[in-house]
Amino acid sequence: MVNPDADATTKPGSPHISRSDGDTWFGHPRQLARLFSTEAMERFGYYGMRALLTLYLTQHFLFSDQTTNGLYGGFTALVYLTPLIGGLLADRYLGSKKSVKFGAILMSLGYLVLCFGGPTAKPYAMVDGTRYEVVIDDAKQQYVIDGAQKLAIKGQEDGSVHLVAPDGAVARDIPKGGFTSDADRSDFYTGLMLVALAMVTIGNGFFKPNISTIVGTLYEQGDRRRDAGFTIFYMGINLGSLFSQILCPFLAVALGWWAGFGLAAIGMMISWALIQFAGEKLEGYGDPPPGQTKDRSLLIYIGALAAIPVGWFLFMNLMTSAPAAAGSGIVGYLLALPIMGKVLFFTFLLSVIGIPIWAYKVGNKVEFQMMVAAIVLIIFNVVFWTLFEQAGSSLTLFADRNTDLTVIGDWKMSAGQTQFFNAFFIVVLAPLTSIMWNALGRRGIEPSIPIKFAIALAGVGLGFLALVWGTAYAGPDFKVALWWLALLYLIHSMAELCISPVGLSMITKLSIVRVVGLMMGLWFLSISCAQYVAGVVAQFASVETVGGQVTNLKVSLETYAAVFETIGFISIGIAVVLLFVSPLIKRFMHGVQ
């Protein structure tokens, strides 16, 4: 309900005074509506781009699954890592509002640069050291051009390749390892694509942590509406992603990759405009910290732009790093990690060891035990997001290759649009889940935080096993019905609601006051590590492709089913372990709910 006297009551005297007693929106400060819309449009851009990225890398640049999944994992890892720096710079120098605007511009430009991918890469094959041109017809069948002959490429279950003549006879039987494929792609446009990804990650670092900070300043300390306000804000994330994951892939298929990425850029610019032209509506909120004698904004902006080549270098390193030699063990594996992998792994390892040691030295027994409980739950959090985030990589490729995307009649979805299921189920189920937790809480039987984490881990595993079950009903084209994939996303969405909303709250409740910020950083670092490891896990589901298309759909289906079954059972096993240790964790939490 809007107060007609809002102008007289809502202008703040300081950044910490709430306007909640004046102009309201669903009982919350009116500014929440603008921030809700800003976040929705930012997520519109990001998730629209993310729905296309894996397919763009495999179908336009014709990268192998190994390269695509590694690059995607590294990109999403940086998306969660850069907010640590962006939040720090906003707190000390820029203020949240300037940071959000700068981040929005940089992300929008990044999406815009992705529109310029150049010509599609041209595939070729190497057979026993000889290079052959490859062409692909409308049915996605690949052919080797051998002189005047056009030989169909048929991958076999044992890893060998048959080159089949038009009359159906096998012209050549190439043993495993004798056939490899790659593509001629422009170094310029490949580099430009990596620059665009670097711009998006850096821009996200400025935007993501600071839009939430502005929401927090709308409420005074102790305002009971704060949690509900953040819940409404969280819905903006899912509404934005819901529509973008339908529209951006649709435009990419109908008009070209440039149109899908272009729509993401437009969404991001709308997000910038909502803050840039807020005028008095956000006056006094998200301003730079007081007491600064010198404006360092320009220096920070220049530094951010100078960091773009660093992002490009990290992505190039991901693409060119050689895997560890067979039999080299865990040490060899760690030493062979790309630079980004080494930084993430060792930083996380030192944090989960060092922080409890510090807590033991400076805190009392209760504080130490609560910090240990938080660290343990953070480690389990890595497992959950590693598996959940297969959505943008291996599950998208599975949708493209081994899923019948027919919705009803002649209406089909594109592979990129399948990611919309998660956002749709979150929007539908989030209110119901909140009602359920409240009802259980009133009866004194709401599960503890460790139990919710265990349910989430079991759920993500069950989702994969449900899809594996569906592969048993694949048709003669080795494709499963779309609804098996939808079932996976339904189960995964239910699991997400058991862990995502409670994680950040858990950190603030269990951490020693002096290091809440550090622990929050560790929480995001854990998600960053999970994103990187998710790319590694997706690489195990890599299949042989030529020109971006698999050479044997049966082998592809069996490969995905085997990997999904393995990680499904592993996740459920880890959930059982957490259930067993949850009484001890709960005791270490000392009554925190």
Image (spheres, rainbow, N blue to C red):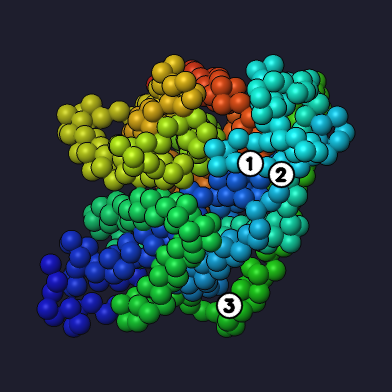
Q: Is residue 245 left or right of residue 196?
A: left
Q: Nearer the viewer, residue 424 or 220?
A: 424
- Image position of 442 with respect to 44: above or below: above
Picture coordinates of residue 18, whole percent (x, y): 27, 69
Q: Nearer the viewer, mark 3 or mark 1?
A: 1
For the point 69% across and 20% down, which residue is it?
A: 169
Please, what is the three-letter code of the amino acid marked with disc 2? Pro
- Is residue 158 left or right of 294 when viewed as pictured? right
Residue annotated with mark 1: 136
Q: Callout 1, which amino acid?
A: Ile
Specify which label sits upstream in the sequence, 3 or 1.
1
Among the two numbered marks 2 and 1 on one chain, the one whose residue lies closer to the N terminus: 2
**Circle 1 residues within 10 Å: few <14, some 14–19, many ≥20:** some
**Mark 3, residue position:** 297
Indicate left or right for 449 with 326 as reference.
left
Neighbour tally class for label 2: few under 14, some 14-19, many 20 plus, Cα within 10 Å: many
